[in-house]
């Protein structure tokens, strides 16, 4: 099977599986780079012609250009493995012929992420003073980031129905869901935000506000 044809089929399958747009973009980007290398350097156009040596050549090419870290190269390798595993699942190539079967990830230096101290966290949260809608909203955002471990992307996509009296349903990456329980202090701030939000948008129809939990300004 032609590599370009199978790439299109693979991308369609990712859409069917409801993968995030960013995931589909990355698959298209790195696989297109691989296919370009296979065509340019080896004249390989068929799925069944790809060998492990070709994947290793991609790694060497990326390393010699010096534009990508081992972590980024590993990201590409993970995408290649998904691509060729799908080819195996669909019966286009045999499992033993999978060119990524014996390809191992590159070593990545471990970095220690320095976190904020309790004192620094308290200082940041307490720095948001005032009783305006924006102050109350921003303070709640900080509390959820630090107290509950929210990701920024999860906060901005939070819906009204996700926030309960004792916990919050988080819709994370890859359609994964988890429940985060909130402390009494966070719950108190949520109640303050709820009242401030209702007052700020009291003259707006509910259907115009939509379902998102955090609102920036009244809609015109």
Image (cartoon, grey):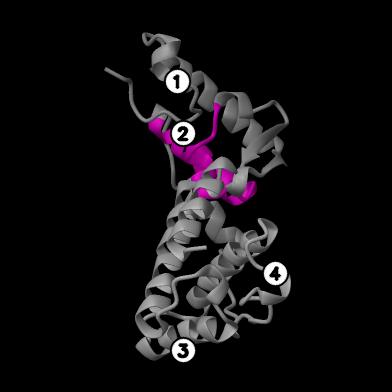
Residue 91 visible somewhere in the drawing: yes
Secondary structure of the residue carrying tag 3 is: helix
- What x and y, as percent, mark residue 85? 65, 64
Q: Pointers 2 and 1 in contact (CB under 8 A)?
A: no
Q: Nearer the viewer, mark 4 or mark 3?
A: 4
- What x and y, as percent, mark residue 35? 42, 71
For disc 4, the marked residue is: 94
Q: Pointers 2 and 3 in contact (CB under 8 A)?
A: no
Secondary structure of the residue carrying tag 2 is: helix
Q: Pointers 1 and 3 in contact (CB under 8 A)?
A: no
Q: Residues within 10 Å of mark 2 (few under 14, many from 20)?
A: many
Which residue is drawn at the image coordinates 66% and 56% (left, top)?
90
Q: Residues within 10 Å of mark 4 (few under 14, many from 20)?
A: few
Q: Residues within 10 Å of mark 1 (few under 14, many from 20)?
A: few
Q: Disc count in the image?
A: 4
Which residue is drawn at the image coordinates 42% and 35% (left, top)?
135
- What x and y, as percent, mark residue 133? 41, 27
Which region is colored magenta? 134-159
N-terminal of the pair, mark 4 or mark 1, is: 4
Q: Nearer the viewer, mark 1 or mark 3?
A: 3
| Placement of 132 over or under 104, stated as above or below | above
Tell me: 95 left or right of 9.
right
For disc 3, the marked residue is: 60
For disc 1, the marked residue is: 210
Q: CA distance from mark 2 to mark 1?
A: 17 Å
């Amino acid at each position: 099977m032609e590599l370009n044809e199978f790439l299109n089929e693979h991308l369609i399958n990712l859409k069917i599986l409801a993968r995030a747009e960013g995931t589909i973009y990355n698959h298209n980007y790195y696989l297109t780079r691989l296919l370009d290398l296979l065509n340019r350097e080896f004249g390989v156009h068929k799925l069944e012609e790809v060998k492990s040596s070709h994947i290793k050549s991609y790694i060497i090419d990326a390393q010699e250009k010096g534009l990508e870290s081992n972590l980024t190269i590993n990201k590409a390798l993970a995408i290649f493995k998904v691509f060729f595993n799908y080819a195996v699942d669909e019966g286009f190539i045999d499992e033993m012929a999978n060119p990524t079967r014996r390809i191992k990830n590159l070593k990545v230096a471990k970095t220690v992420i320095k976190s904020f101290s309790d004192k620094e966290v308290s200082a940041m949260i307490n720095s948001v003073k005032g009783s305006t809608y924006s102050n109350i909203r921003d303070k709640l955002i900080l509390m959820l980031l630090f107290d509950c471990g929210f990701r920024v992307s999860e906060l901005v996509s939070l819906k009204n129905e996700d926030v309960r009296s004792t916990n919050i349903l988080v819709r994370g990456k890859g359609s994964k869901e988890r429940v985060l329980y909130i402390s009494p202090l966070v719950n108190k701030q949520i109640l303050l935000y709820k009242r401030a939000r209702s007052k700020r948008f009291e003259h707006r129809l509910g259907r115009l506000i939509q379902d998102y939990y955090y609102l920036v300004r009244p809609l015109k």
